[in-house]
């Protein structure tokens, strides 16, 4: 291939044309990058608004649920006070031994569980003639002195 020689005017024109093309390409790339950044920013803002809207909807649902449950909370608190009163009355009925026994129950037990325990075990706190705390024993069947002795077989 043969070397082509340009005149200085031609070389200046070519240099100007290449320079102009480079500048236009750089500006075009910068414009595209700026547009891409702006699009990504808008998408992120939109996603944040969507997420925020979902949180707002979720918060509104929770708020409605709380308003729905408020009467039930008051009712449960009333029942808890009633059970505590019943437990106190049952302890007083059975005396100091019952008070000591109930206070020794695990702290994790609710008032209704303690009341149930006291009702199930109330025999421990009733006097049966053998002393306080002696469980009632079933009456023994009368023994017949003339009963026939048992026979052991198979020996």
Image: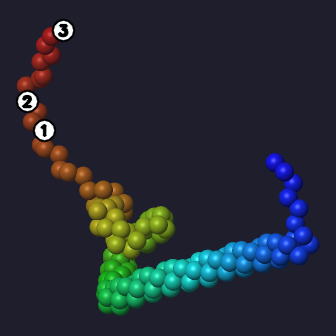
Residue that carries the numbered disc 3 in the rendered image: 155
Residue that carries the numbered disc 1 in the rendered image: 143
Q: Is disc 3 surrounded by few (<14), some (14 to 19) or many (20+) residues within 10 Å?
A: few
Give the camera-side residue of 152 and 4: 4
Res. 130 in view? no
Residue 49 is labelled as none
User: Where is residue 84, by image quadrant?
Assistant: bottom left
Tag 3 secondary structure: loop
Instruction: Determine the CA span between mark 3 and mark 1.
Output: 27 Å
Q: How many marks?
A: 3
Res. 29 in view? yes
Give the camera-side residue of 39 and 28: 28
Residue lying at 78% horizontally and 75% vertically, measured from the top left: 17
- Select label 3 or label 1 by which is in front: 3
Tag 1 secondary structure: loop
Instruction: Determine the CA span between mark 1 and mark 2.
Output: 8 Å
Q: Are marks 1 and 2 in contact (CB under 8 Å)?
A: yes
- First of labels 3, 2 by sequence position: 2
Residue lying at 15% horizontally and 16% vertically, measured from the top left: 152
Can you give x and y, in whole percent of width and height, for residue 142 in the image? 12, 43
Side of 7 where 54 appears, left or right: left
User: Where is residue 58, by image quadrant?
Assistant: bottom left
Residue lying at 38% horizontally and 69% vertically, measured from the top left: 114
Q: Is disc 2 surrounded by few (<14), some (14 to 19) or many (20+) residues within 10 Å?
A: few
Can you give x and y, in whole percent of width and height, for residue 36 in the image? 61, 77
Residue that carries the numbered disc 2 in the rendered image: 147
Q: Is disc 1 surrounded by few (<14), some (14 to 19) or many (20+) residues within 10 Å?
A: few
Give the camera-side residue of 120 and 2: 2
């Amino acid at each position: 291939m043969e070397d082509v020689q340009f005149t200085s005017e031609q070389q200046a024109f070519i240099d100007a044309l290449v320079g102009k093309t480079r500048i236009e390409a750089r500006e075009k790339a910068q414009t595209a990058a700026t547009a891409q950044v702006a699009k990504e920013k808008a998408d992120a803002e939109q996603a944040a608004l969507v997420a925020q809207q979902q949180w707002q909807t979720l918060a509104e649902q929770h708020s409605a649920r709380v308003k729905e449950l408020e009467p039930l909370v008051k009712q449960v608190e009333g029942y808890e006070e009633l059970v505590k009163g019943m437990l106190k009355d049952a302890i007083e009925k059975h005396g100091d031994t019952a008070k000591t026994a109930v206070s020794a129950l695990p702290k994790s037990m609710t008032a209704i569980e303690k009341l149930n325990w006291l009702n199930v075990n109330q025999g421990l706190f009733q006097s049966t003639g053998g002393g306080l705390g002696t469980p009632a024993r079933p009456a023994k069947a009368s023994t017949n002195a003339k009963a026939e002795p048992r026979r052991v077989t198979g020996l």
